Amino acid sequence: MPTTPATVRNLIGGEWTGDPAVERRNPARPEEVVAVAPSSAAADARAAVTAARQAQPAWAATPPPARGAILLDAAELLRARHEDVARDLVREEGKTLPEARGEVRRAIDVLRFFGALGWHATGEVLPSGLPDTQVLTRSEPVGTAALITPWNFPIAIPTWKAAPALVTGNTVVLKPAELTPLCAHHLASVLVEAGLPAGVLNVVHGRGSVVGDALARDERVAALSFTGSTAVGQGLHRVLSERRARVQLEMGGKNAYLVLDDADPAAAARVVAAGAFGATGQVCTATSRVYVTPGIREEFTAALVKEADAHVPGDGLLPDTTMGPVVSKDQLAVDTAAIARAREQGARVAAGGFAPRGLLLRPTVLADVDHSSDAAREEIFGPVVAVLAVDDYEHGLARVNDSAYGLAAGICTTSLSRAHDFAARVQAGVVKVNRPTAGLDLNVPFGGVKDSSTNTFREQGTAAADFYTWTKTVYLGHQ
Ligand code: ADP
């Protein structure tokens, strides 16, 4: 059944503005226009910052529980439209319906978590070396934060950046990914309907090189949180560091798994497949290289191929579909070029390796991959996993760590001591033992090391609030 495209507008100073200009089409059904959104200018980004600056003092003066209450009410509103938003997410980004439902559920829970945080004490009371004096610390909001987000978790990521910023008294300008304006619109809508005052959250749609760049260069933006590619993140880092503003970057990954002889091959294959092919592999923590010791290699690879071959790529709204399409033509071109290059560099395509129709790509297992080849080094961001041989645990750990990236890593083993040793020595911000690299809890810190992350402030959990606040130390004496 054809649906009318949604009209998405900017949100600036409480007004929905901007002429819808750019179409977003359903990656599973290119004839279907899902949403039309503005293509904003740098001046729109600056207007949003002006609105955010104006709204900030009153918002910071609002008691934290009252700020949190708005997030809690927004969570309720999102819950009431859970199914509709999940279906829009499928049509806009391409996840399967169960994956999309899970993501919207995540956004609801994040709003609840940070809404409740409004009631929590912040700061400490400490003794002073001075007589009749107490020291206390206050968490002050940084001011106005810019959030630049990617398309792969189009509602969860904007939510997990905006919620901690808002509850701690900051105002926000959000620049969502061009491919997924509608999901960001749903988030903004529930926050506005829940009573967020005008200017506290602003949303500007448009190109990264225009809107994102203008936000990064605006001196009034005190902090910028970004999730996206390493190349863009590094450029933003230069701009923000130059003017000594805070910057939080979550960028690429080349997440590795180590499968040891003592693991169960079928269970290991399930874990690796879930990490590699979930959400069509378009996840920054997706498993993309697997090092396997000799005793289990053959059985594990066969089991992984079976997992890949069992997938049914298709339209995420259809009940039989287990894997949605690739998000765009450009991304599919990146994926297929990477597979072709892997072949040229000696890999054997053990499963998938081709795009049967449209933007659908079969989950792909590349076997006999050489550790020095591109398939073992460069992020692909699709349902493609490389299998590589290692001699033993030490060899495998060294290979896992031999990467420019350090976001997530995992090990399949039944040895508790190996698991502990791996957790201690692996160079990654997230470590999983016998669990898929992708899939995170919302109440715990998240972030990477090396080229994956700024590795300063973590996202998610209570740690997320640190990026949006600074500590003031007050010496309180009495006369
Ligand atoms: P992805 O592969 O997820 O599209 P990008 O890094 O290109 O990764 O995009 C992530 C976000 O960064 C998007 O919202 C995009 O519009 C934005 N972006 C892209 N280029 C720039 C830039 N030069 N300055 C600021 N933001 C940018």
Image: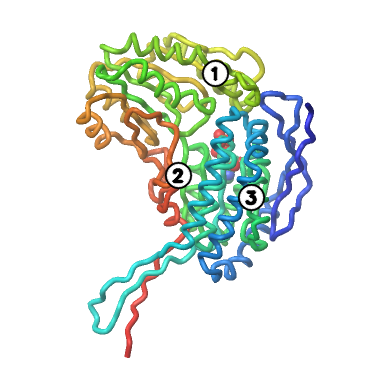
The residue identified by callout 3 is 77
Image coordinates of residue 64 in percent, x first then y, are 51, 65
Question: Can you name the residue that lies furthest to the bottom here?
Answer: 479
Ligand number 1: quarter of image: top right
Against 145, residue 89 (above or below) is above
The residue identified by callout 2 is 442
2 vs 1, front mark: 2
Residue type, numbered disc 3:
Leu
First reached walking from the N terminus: tag 2 or tag 3: 3
Task: Say whether residue 363 is visible.
Answer: yes
Task: Compute the Cα span from label 3 to label 1.
Answer: 43 Å
Q: Nearer the viewer, residue 197 or 335?
A: 197
First reached walking from the N terminus: tag 2 or tag 1: 1
Image coordinates of residue 432 in percent, x first then y, are 34, 33
Q: Nearer the viewer, residue 400 or 62?
A: 62
Q: Which quadrant of the view contains residue 394?
A: top left
Residue type, numbered disc 1:
Ala
Task: Say whether residue 50 is visible.
Answer: no
Against 25, residue 353 (above or below) is above
Q: Rate crowding at label 1 as few (under 14), some (14 to 19) or many (20 or more) other CA atoms within 10 Å.
A: few
Discs 2, 3 touching: Cβ within 8 Å: no
Per the rendering, the mark at residue 337 is 1
Q: Rate crowding at label 3 as few (under 14), some (14 to 19) or many (20 or more) other CA atoms within 10 Å.
A: some
